Image (cartoon, rainbow, N blue to C red):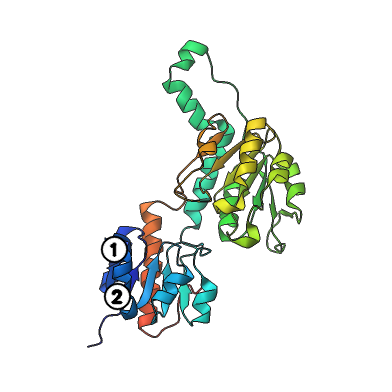
Amino acid sequence: MTAKPEILIQSPWYEPAMCRLDELGVTHHLWQAADPDALLAEVGPRCSIIGTFQVCPASLIRAVPNLELILTFGVGYDGVDVAEATRRGVRVVNTPSVLNDCVADLAMALVLAGRRQVVQADRYAREGRWERDGDYPYTLHVTGCRVGIVGLGRIGMEIAARCAAFKMEICYHQRTPRSDVPWTHHPDLVGMARECDILVVIVPGGDATRHLVGEEVMAALGPRGHLVNVARGSVIDTDALVRCLNDGRLGSAALDVYPDEPRIPRALLDITANLTLTPHIASATHHTRMAMGMVLHDNLRAWLDGRRLITPVN
């Protein structure tokens, strides 16, 4: 009987799905260890697989000399040193597609929350201000608005479908125009922002998109514009966002992602009138997180059976 492979769990994901890996291998949970360095030194040489929640630096890859496969929970893998893994002959898999609908759902929730000021209106009602101060101030509409989607990939397409249901005028920005959609492609992001009421950001993280949405883009979106980020925190220049929200050059924003999670900059927390914050929950439903975890489980089973990986990154 073939011995089960040993798996190093660097950081946890949805527990019911993560525990399914115990069916296929012997797991060692680095994130639970009282002395992670000692555990890594002990089991690292025996492990051939790393499981992680989107983070796997070169130092960890080098600490597991017999590594063959990295299972990363999430569609984004900018926190995984894929170049080092590839150099070492290590395969990397992620969990695309199964989270598209949930992320798109939250993107629309943040569009609605920001334009209709749902969080602020809730606070107004709970503080008794409706009775004391009168009706809540008028907000901005959503149906029929012009929306620009920054990144029309799998999730971007689902966001566009939801925007279409709200009778919105859709356009998009990315390097290469798509031939399979009827919407206008804008090669210039600032120009697109100038023509939109709402901007929804859903591009990969990494150096190529760092601060893609900066002060010029926000100012172009304007004092009645609404910015939504369900991509990566690095894509938006946070300092510029704070300035533009505070001085009125940008009307409002709603964020689910941040540059240094789980830390949210104090300057963002201090803005309550025109900023909605959620703690990176776009894919965080029981159904979707289980589906994501099972993509990793099924990739590992395929790898153990000598079959082709299902969702390879490299």
Residue 291, percent across and down? Answer: 39, 62
Find residue 22 and report its horizontal and vertical position in percent: 26, 70
Which residue in the protein does label 2 denote? Answer: 43
Of the residues tagged 1 and 2, which is closer to the observer? 1
Front residue of this view, candidates 309 and 157: 309
| In this picture, residue 92 sits left or right of residue 153 | left
Q: Is residue 91 left or right of residue 177?
A: left
| Image quarter hosting the N terminus | bottom left
Kindly identify the residue that appears in the image at 62 percent across and 30 percent down: 140
Amino acid type of the residue that numbered disc 2 sits on in the rendered structure: Val
Q: Position of residue 241 (x, y in %)?
A: 62, 41
For the question of whether residue 314 can be seen, the reply is no
Q: Position of residue 147 (x, y in %)?
A: 66, 45
Q: What's under tag 1, amino acid-wise?
A: Asp
Q: Which residue is mark 1?
A: 35
Dot 1: within a 10 Å radius of its alpha carbon, few (fewer than 14), some, or many (20 or more) residues?
few
